[in-house]
Amino acid sequence: MTAAAPLVTVIVPGRDIADFAPDALDSLRAQTEQRWQAILVDDGSQDDTGAIFRAAAAGDRRFRFIAHEASRGLGAARNVALDAVDTPLVGFLDGDDELTPTALERLVGTLVETGSDFVAGAYVRSRFDGRSYAPGRVQPWVSAATNPARLGTTIYEHPRASANIVAWSKVSRLDMWRDLRFPEGVAYEDQLVAQSMYTQARAFDVIPDVVVHWRLRADGTSITQSRARLSVLRDYIGALRGGIRILHEAGAAEAVSARLELILAMDLPPLIDIAATHPDPEYATVVAAFVAELEALPEFADAHPDPTITAALAW
């Protein structure tokens, strides 16, 4: 019997994630939806990531391997793989995360049913408990974006979908990527892409199923755990600013308000705490300038920030 042609390509980039890559690849092999293939991109790793990816491709024809001699960044790694996709659907999995077993079945099956441009699922953080990485609960902002299921919706009908900004919670039609690519040379590159997808889609779906376990590394080396670095802060704020701009230019005022609420509640307080003791005064200057930008937005008044957050902004 011939194997069914693959429906979806999963792009798996990684750099120096040899300790986690086997789990990511095993989570692909364990999928209940078997009509997948994967492109593994080693982004100039100094550890055994490349060897792990290469061995996977040598032993299983569903895996293809691409190597960058020197690191070009996550955005570039994803873009190189996007140019090689030859299936109708495409998704992403970072090489240190894991898909849940039914992730592709639910994501691909939903798109087959609805004909929408993309589908987004829920995700949970996976934290080290002293022995292993254990998944937590769905966070409130993720739940607001994905629960209950909405099929064939838009960002104007469902503005809180804009909180689901990660690349790896979604499967989309390859046609969406005809004129869309990830920014290169910066961190948090998926935020601008996500808001572009929401505003450009004819229709998209959201489902409450947890599709990814997002690993927060115990050694604190992931980008999301490095916001005390001024260069990372600039990229972080640039991504937040760019995402708001995309929603604003699309006339998605309610989505802008929803994003502002979340940024004020979740993103700014840790940055303000870091700024209060950061040895470089430029850090506080950058954060303060961003706060002033947010307060000047016409949608700010509709964002209903918590009073304690509003007080913190005056720091």
Image (cartoon, rainbow, N blue to C red):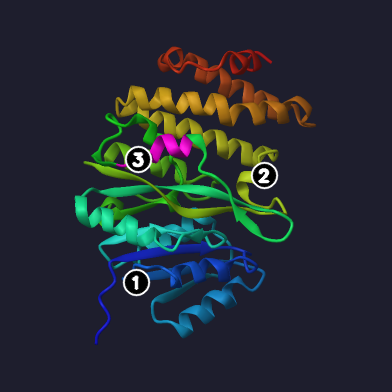
Identify the residue shown where x is 52% and y is 28%: 263
Q: Residues within 10 Å of mark 1 (few under 14, many from 20)?
A: some
Residue 26: x and y, percent?
51, 71
Q: For the residue marked with disc 3, what is the amino acid? A: Ser
Which residues lie in the magenta part? 141-149
Q: For the residue marked with disc 2, what is the amino acid? A: Ser
Q: Is residue 149 above or below residue 250?
A: below
Q: Which mark is residue 226?
A: 2
Q: For the residue marked with disc 1, what is the amino acid? A: Gln
- Residue underneath mark 3: 196
Nearest to viewer (mark 2 / mark 1)? 1
Q: Quadrant of the N terminus?
A: bottom left
Say whether residue 69 is visible.
no
Mark found first going from the N terminus, 2 or 1: 1
Mark found first going from the N terminus, 3 or 2: 3
**Relative depth, front residue between 29 and 44:** 29
Q: CA distance from mark 1 to mark 3?
A: 29 Å
Q: Is residue 27 above or below residue 74?
A: below
Identify the residue shown where x is 74% and y is 56%: 130
**Judging from the image, what secondary structure is the residue with disc 1 in?**
loop
Q: CA distance from mark 2 to mark 1?
A: 36 Å
- Whether tag 3 and tag 2 are in contact, CB under 8 A, the answer is no
Q: Quadrant of the C terminus?
A: top right
